[in-house]
Image: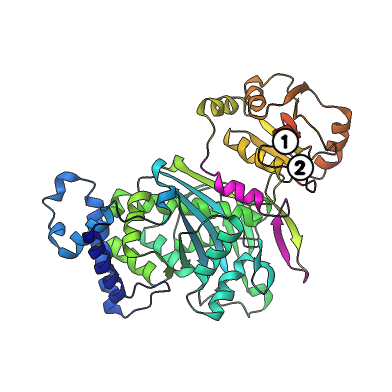
């Protein structure tokens, strides 16, 4: 590596040490905080204005020795972000209540954000707080408690502990983590003047906890939340209530619906942050920086923040992939109960192989021409495992989603040991474009209608669902569909 780059890195390391840039929450005197703000504002402004070459020679910022060094370091090809060599940078985003909230060290929000620099794409995978994960010397625990366990033992270690847990179970490296508490979340949105959110469903929550009323009589502990469907401008307080609501009636009453709302808010904040108004407003950037500085912890260094900013700011909304791990009929999780009676979520297959497959293949996309055919037909498919090969049906379902298929449900077939995959076309040829894509993808035989045994199997299962999606095709996988497994296992989805 160039000696000049080594010197720049050394200088920046000394700068970070002097500013208190540590892998823990930053709580410094006002004087030092102001200096951090000034530095970040200047660095971010310089990086932004660098996008306009004609302004570079005229900008007095570039004559500042400190800014000149940072600029050269960030732009150096020899200085890379973690994960850049693999074209995938993984950042774990964690939301906690903070010291003023009950259970303030529990991670209320866990999102794995993956950045693919070469294609300017981002994937957001929401991890439910009730997911059961192995914790050393403690057995299986909810993943939202890992941060609290670590912080209790050693302050500032929570983010790293959660990162390591996610890395182990998902089998993917976590390069960075960023933890922010509710206070910081509210302040950032208020600083931005609010955000616009398209509320998908009207819903009411009569059990939203009121801060400071944890010990009050039961009837006084909660407030009534109401959200109307449609676009709304939310301030920090309202946005926090929108993403935290857990007891709404109807479809918005689950943690999985809440995870989708969190992703929606995250995208809205990103759009506001990357707007021209924000980038060219030094006072606003200064205020944002202070509010975040007081309420976050991270292992991202200053130069890495600037470089990540440069990569993320040009990503378009259509290149952001969203996924929520859930217990829906086509989901990768199922309800479970721990030995002490606590509610948990466990992987459908009994291990994390399907979740690992999703994570590692999140950016693998289907051919555009095939997606267009499926989307024109608006086809729904049910996938059933007709083999003893673990995880086969869910892996195919994950792939078919990328082709534009709606996954009605995923399950096992009552008939096992099938050699050849079979597609039962319930449209009788009415959606031939989608059928052609499905056949080419799976190399399955096609039959019109359903056999008697499958009709009987479906009758009891579908009746248990509240609003079942009616599939256009049912595919039952045979062993010829497997290209990654050998041998046998228990008959799981």
Q: Residues within 10 Å of mark 2 (few under 14, many from 20)?
A: some
Residue at 59% x, 55% y is: 170
State how far apart marks 2 and 1 are (Cα).
8 Å
- Residue 411, which numbered label? 2
Q: Secondary structure at mark 1?
A: strand
- Residue 399, which numbered label? none
CB atoms of marks 2 and 1 within 8 Å:
yes
Name the foreground residue: 328 vs 199.
Answer: 328
Specify whether residue 6 is painted magenta. no
Quadrant (top left, top right, bottom left, bottom right) of the C terminus: top right
Residue 282 visible at all: no
Q: Position of residue 444 (x, y in %)?
A: 72, 26
Q: Secondary structure at mark 2?
A: strand
Name the foreground residue: 404 vs 255.
Answer: 404
Q: Which residue, given by chain and number where applicable, does mark 1 sit on?
A: 382
In this picture, residue 79 sits left or right of residue 469: left
- Give, as a single range, the part of the protein colored magenta: 340-364
Instruction: Say if 1 sits above or below 382 in the image.
Output: below
């Amino acid at each position: 590596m160039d000696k000049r780059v080594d010197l720049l890195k050394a200088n920046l390391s000394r700068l970070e040490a002097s500013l208190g840039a540590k892998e823990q929450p930053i709580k410094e005197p006002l004087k030092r905080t102001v200096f951090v703000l000034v530095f970040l504002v200047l660095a971010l402004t310089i990086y932004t204005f660098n996008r306009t070459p004609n302004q570079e020679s005229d900008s007095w910022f570039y004559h500042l020795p400190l800014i000149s060094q940072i600029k050269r370091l960030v732009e150096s090809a020899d200085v890379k972000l973690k994960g850049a060599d693999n074209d995938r940078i993984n950042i774990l985003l964690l939301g906690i209540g903070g010291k003023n909230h009950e259970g303030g060290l529990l991670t209320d929000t866990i999102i794995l954000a993956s950045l693919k620099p070469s294609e300017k794409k981002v994937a957001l995978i929401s991890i439910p707080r009730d997911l059961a994960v192995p914790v050393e010397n403690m057995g299986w625990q909810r993943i939202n408690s890992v941060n609290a366990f670590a912080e209790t033992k050693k302050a500032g270690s929570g983010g790293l502990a959660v990162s390591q847990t996610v890395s182990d179970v998902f089998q993917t490296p976590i390069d960075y983590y960023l933890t922010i508490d509710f206070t910081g979340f509210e302040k950032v949105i208020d600083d931005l003047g609010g955000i616009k959110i398209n509320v998908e469903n009207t819903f009411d929550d009569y059990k939203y906890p009121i801060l400071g009323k944890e010990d009050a009589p039961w009837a006084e502990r909660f407030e009534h939340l109401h959200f109307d469907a449609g676009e709304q401008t939310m301030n920090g307080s309202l946005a926090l209530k929108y993403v935290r609501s857990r007891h709404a009636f109807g479809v918005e009453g689950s943690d999985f619906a809440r995870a989708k709302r969190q992703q929606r808010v995250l995208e809205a904040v990103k759009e506001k942050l990357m707007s021209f108004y924000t980038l060219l407003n030094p006072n606003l950037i200064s205020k944002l920086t202070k509010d975040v500085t007081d309420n976050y912890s991270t292992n991202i260094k200053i130069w890495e923040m600037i470089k990540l900013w440069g990569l993320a700011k040009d990503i378009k909304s259509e290149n952001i992939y969203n996924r929520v791990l859930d217990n829906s009929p086509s989901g990768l999780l199922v309800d479970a109960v721990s030995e002490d009676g606590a509610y948990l979520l466990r992987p459908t297959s009994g291990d994390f192989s399907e979740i690992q497959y999703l994570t590692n293949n999140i950016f693998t996309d289907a051919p555009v021409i095939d997606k267009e055919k499926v989307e024109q037909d608006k086809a729904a498919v049910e996938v059933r495992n007709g083999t003893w090969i673990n995880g086969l049906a869910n892996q195919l379902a994950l792939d078919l989603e990328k082709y534009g298929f709606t996954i009605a449900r995923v399950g096992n077939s009552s008939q096992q040991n099938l050699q050849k995959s079979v597609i039962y076309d319930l449209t009788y040829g009415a959606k031939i474009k989608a059928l052609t894509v499905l056949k080419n993808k799976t190399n399955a035989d096609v039959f019109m209608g359903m056999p008697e045994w499958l009709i009987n199997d479906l009758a009891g299962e579908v009746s248990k669902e509240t609003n079942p999606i009616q599939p256009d095709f049912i595919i039952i996988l045979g062993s010829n569909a497997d290209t990654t497994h050998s041998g046998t296992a228990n008959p799981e989805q």
